[in-house]
Image (cartoon, grey):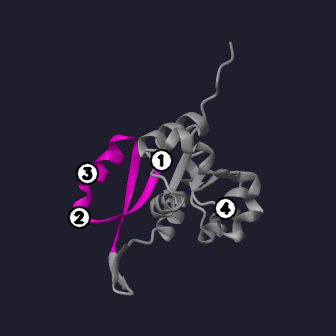
Amino acid sequence: MTIKIKHNNYAFIDSQNLNLGVQKQGWKLDFAKFRILLRDKYDVQRAFIFIGFVPGNQVLYSYLQNNGYNCIFKPTVLKTNNGKTEVKGNCDADLVLHTMIEYSNFEKAVIVAGDGDYYCLYEYLSKQNKLFKIIVPNKKFSSLIRKFNMFIVNIQLFKDKLIK
């Protein structure tokens, strides 16, 4: 009988990057299934999801929290572009900051984003042997992070398990 060693890994998730990435590939993510995958496949004990706070989305936030996510909220702003109003809640700095706040509490980090803005975080965690995986939600991700190919996993590999 083999005993699986439990690790204390944490996930840090850019919700907008994740959500828009899978939508661009033509499917919707089941966040409950994704949390289970993070726990079972990558030993993620805590999953921090960085999300812009919109007052009418309390049902979504409760759903995420009830499925094991620690929601880190970012204030949002409305941005109009070509007559189209978008809600913006850029969470990049928050994700980096919280990863460093939690640094001593986890063995390894799973970062969910394909954004080159996290290059310095990937580099630092890699040098400290604390980077476990980078789950990219897009088929095309920033060329800046190709240096970390050995850590990169495309969420598309799990589509059948994660589709809503």
Q: Position of residue 116 (x, y in %)?
A: 63, 70
Q: Is residue 122 above or below residue 88?
A: above
Helix, strand or loop for disc 2: helix
Amino acid identity at mark 2: Pro
Pointer 4 residue: 122
Helix, strand or loop for disc 3: helix
Pointer 1 residue: 47
Q: Position of residue 146 (x, y in %)?
A: 74, 64
Q: Is residue 60 magenta?
A: yes
Q: Earlier in the sequence, mark 4 or mark 2?
A: 2
Helix, strand or loop for disc 1: strand
Instruction: Please tell me in which quadrant of the rendered image residue 51 appears.
Output: bottom left
Q: Position of residue 57 (x, y in %)?
A: 26, 58
Pointer 2 residue: 55
Amino acid identity at mark 1: Ala
Q: Earlier in the sequence, mark 4 or mark 1?
A: 1
Instruction: Please tell me in which quadrant of the rendered image residue 1 appears.
Output: top right
Q: Earlier in the sequence, mark 2 or mark 1?
A: 1
Residue, far top:
1
Tell me the number on the disc at residue 59. 3
- Marks 4 & 2, CB-CB < 8 Å contact: no
Q: Which residues are magenta?
A: 47-76
Q: Earlier in the sequence, mark 3 or mark 4?
A: 3
Residue 126 can be seen, yes or no: yes
Residue, far front:
26
Q: Earlier in the sequence, mark 1 or mark 3?
A: 1
* Distance in Å between CA atoms under marks 3 and 2: 10 Å
| Front label number (4 vs 2) | 2
Q: Is residue 13 above or below residue 55?
A: above
Q: Position of residue 147 (x, y in %)?
A: 77, 64
Check disc 4: other Cα within 10 Å, few if <14, some if 14-19, many if 20+. many
